[in-house]
Amino acid sequence: MPTLLGNILYTYEDYPLSRHGYDAVFYWPRLWLQLPKDMREEVDSAWSVADGWLYASAALALSGVIHGISATVDAALILSQGVGLVFHTLTGCFAGGLFAFALLAFAYVPYWISLPAHRRNGELFKSLFDLNWQTLDKLKVSPSRERAHAVFQALQYNDDEGLRRLRRKRKWWRF
């Protein structure tokens, strides 16, 4: 993945499929509903810390982009019309551009702070699948990639062709 956060997310989202044969994107909401309320609250509070740092990073980056655009537009207006909307002088536009650059640079700090929290969340996510895979077995899905994918296609997209193909191979759910 192109970012550190992308690598972290890919690592723990791929784990249930590689370990148990369950697609995390499809099965996570089903597992989430089976968790006790206190466990869901604990997971939510742990994930809110990482999400908060990520939101702060995004807010700083967005502020930097908006500030940079306004400084650039004002500089263009000052050069062409002689009047700026926000900064009123080229020196002010230059200072605004430096401030925009600083905001973009500082946006990396909360992002970097959020990475260990995302790693901890990933371990929590993996352990929830490890400890509760029997709950997913109640859906009668065998931990094989082919079967999990066929069931995913059938339930998510109403595509029964994969299920028919599995029935013909006599590879079907465990009863």
Image (spheres, rainbow, N blue to C red):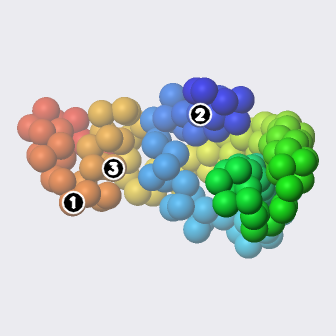
User: Which residue lies at the image location 76% right of the left edge and 63% below the top edge?
Assistant: 84
Q: Is residue 1 left or right of residue 104?
A: left
Q: Amino acid at mark 3?
A: Phe
Q: Amino acid at mark 2?
A: Tyr
Element carrying mark 1:
loop
Q: Give the mark, 1 or 2, whose residue is nearer the N terminus.
A: 2
Toward the bottom, the furthest residue is 37
Q: Which mark is residue 84?
A: none
How far apart in space, not on screen, are marks 3 and 1 (Cα)?
Answer: 9 Å
Mark 1, residues whose alpha carbon is within 10 Å: few (<14), some, or many (≥20)? Answer: few
Q: Which residue is mark 3?
A: 152
Element carrying mark 2:
helix
**Image x and y of residue 102, in percent:** 89, 42
**Image x and y of residue 156, in percent:** 32, 58
Quadrant in which residue 101 is drawn: top right
How far apart in space, not on screen, are marks 1 and 2 (Cα)?
Answer: 26 Å
**Image x and y of residue 53, in percent:** 84, 52
Q: Are marks 3 and 1 in contact (CB under 8 Å)?
A: no
Q: Give the mark, 3 or 1, whose residue is nearer the N terminus.
A: 3
- In the image, residue 5 above or below residue 44: above
Q: Which residue is mark 1?
A: 158
